[in-house]
Image: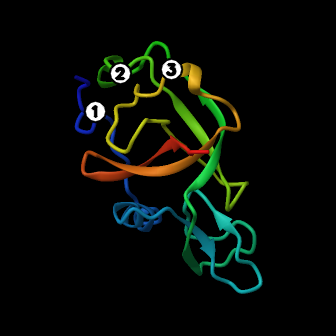
Amino acid sequence: MPRSDTDTLLSPVIDDDGAPFWEYSSRGELRIQACARPDCGELRFPPRPCCPHCQSFDSEWRRMSGRGRIWSYVLPHPPLLPAYAELAPYNAILVELADAPHIRLAGNLVSGPDAPLNSVPSERLRIGAKVQVVFAYVGGVAVPRWVLERA
């Protein structure tokens, strides 16, 4: 039986700018920060206080579909931290969001929300594979992970 990894892996560090992202994640929502200035509206990630396009400090959080595609991936060998050594080989992926192709989120491809990081065989990883967000609790924080989209 696979060991749960949710209590031994690194948890996100939550700062003031990113706190809403994690709050929405805890509700099962993937939201991305956007400039709230009507003549701009640019999405930005990672979250920050000022829009890099127009320098406005007004922002809002837009709900995304949670769909994307694998833009890149890696299979870390050897793992750098002991908690990850037991899960090797596992994947780390970059997902390009379908709703915002210039936004890419790091995460892991898993077989389900509570599955371990090594639950998807490495031969199933493909650049361009369509994925859907799921959320798993790591150290009490809901983090986005990804599952292959059903055809």
The answer to whether mark 1 and mark 2 are in CB contact below 8 A is yes
Is residue 132 shown left or right of residue 10?
Answer: right
Point out residue 46 in the picture as x, y percentages from the top left corner: 57, 56
Distance, label 1 to label 2, CA atoms, is 8 Å
Can you identify the residue that label 1 sits on? 5
Foreground pick, 68 / 17: 68
The earlier-in-sequence mark between 1 and 3 is 1
The earlier-in-sequence mark between 3 and 2 is 3
Q: Residue at x 60, y 58 (%)?
A: 45
Mark 2 residue crowding within 10 angstroms, few (<14) / some (14–19) / many (20+): some
Element under disc 1: loop
- Residue type at mark 1 is Asp
Distance, label 3 to label 2, CA atoms, is 10 Å
Mark 3 residue crowding within 10 angstroms, few (<14) / some (14–19) / many (20+): some
Can you identify the residue that label 2 sits on? 87
- Give the quadrant of the C terminus: top right
